[in-house]
Amino acid sequence: MNEPIDDREADALLTPLAEWPRLALAISGGGDSLALMHLATRWAAHWPEPPSLHVLTVDHGLHPAAADVAASVCEKAAVLNLPCTVLRWGGEKPEAGIEEAARQARYALMADWCRAHDAALVTAHTLEDQAETVLMRLARGSGLDGLSAMRPRGHVPGAPDVPLLRPLLSVSRARLRATLRALGEEWHEDPANADARFERVRLRRAWPLLEELGLTPQQLARSAHRLRRARDALESITHGFLREHAHLHPLGRAEIDLKTLLSQPDEIVLRVLARLLGALRGQAKPLRNMAGLEGLLEWLRMPEEEAGRARVLAGMRLEHRGTRLLVGREPGRIGSPKELHPVPHLETVWDGRFHVTIEELRSPATLQSLQQALEAGAMCQEDVPARPADVPAFAWRAQPTLVHAERIIALPALHWRAADAPLRAAQVRPLFPDRF
């Protein structure tokens, strides 16, 4: 039955959000998100120590009414005594892939706001959204991880430091709209919801036929939940294996006994590789290139004389060294050098792997990999550290390097700088883990 959500059910859905002191509600003006705004307001009104609520709405500028819709959201938020911020996606819009580009822009804008205000982001993803996600991923040939779909708790895509909360994944759109009707509230229907160019719209039109076959949103969401349990179990095994067998080193490389790794079932080997490659790239999430990972698994199981010594995937190098597998950044895949100008204090992220801090840079310099510096003819002073015998050449050449006037002046990951370097200090903080 499509009954409105009462206060008791709202409490059960939203009370898990109480552990965050500030919540940013992602409100588009559509029925799902407006219902979230009302439910969250009612819940917070009688919760003993509720989080502070702030409404975020994004003006994509994709249709003429976009600005008016955003303004309407803030007007409705004001009625509920909620502060509201309109975030605008400026610049040129891509001609192709606009749905995904808008999604990425929306998340990036809201993540920036949440980061600046120490808030968790709350979205109104519904039961149908979950089911549609399962079907879209099934169409792409996703494995267990993809088919387990959206989690009630996760992180904003592209912003692993910002929590993303989805309290309405078990609730249908019809019940959210029934809730709004009971309040006498109207909502905006996004024109994109009728545009058959978009994959979700085509899926929604197919629901009657799918339901005739028993593929209801409830059944698909139930399958996703059960797959998520299996995924969590496999992730626990993978994490335990990495914690026990993966040896991580400060320059951003890992070693693992190849025989021990290959003694595991294929699924665990694939997950170990995905976790290693993702972590050493400075990303919180595992690598999501299943075809590439399966190619690596096939390579690892080949006789060494047939397989060759090394492979590269997603900018990461994997190398056979006797009984060991070495994993680290491929120096030839690192992006362009970063030009630095004199500044009292500078902080930047380099190659996604290191947070670099430089104090009192008095002359222009370049931040690049050691390999890039050497290939460009940068000179090494006599006191530049030599590569230790136990450090693979590829890992050594992939470390951050500061160059000034065609001279290497600092290797901050090694805490070394030239005595006459035109800076007071250069330090790095790895963005990859030191242990699992």
Image (cartoon, rainbow, N blue to C red):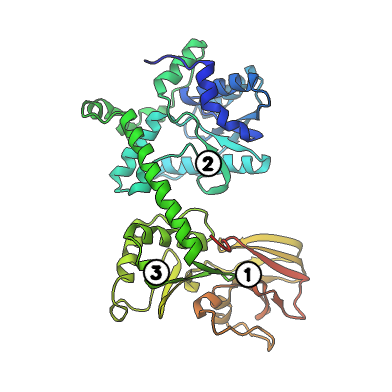
x and y, in percent, of residue 252 in the image: 55, 68
- Residue drawn 44% across the image and 45% down it: 94
Is label 3 or label 2 in front? 3
Q: CA distance from mark 1 to mark 3?
A: 38 Å
**Left or right: 98, with 371 as reference point:** left
Query: Which amino acid type corresponds to the residue marked 3 in the rendered image?
Result: Thr
x and y, in percent, of residue 394 in the image: 50, 77
- Residue 367: which disc? 1
Secondary structure found at label 2:
helix
Query: Which amino acid type corresponds to the residue marked 1 in the rendered image?
Result: Leu
Is label 1 or label 3 in front? 3
**Left or right: 66, with 205 as reference point:** right
**Left or right: 28, with 366 as reference point:** left
The residue to which callout 2 is attached is: 107
Residue density around tag 2, few if under 14, some if 14–19, many if 20 or more, within 10 Å: some
Residue sitting farthest toward the bottom: 382
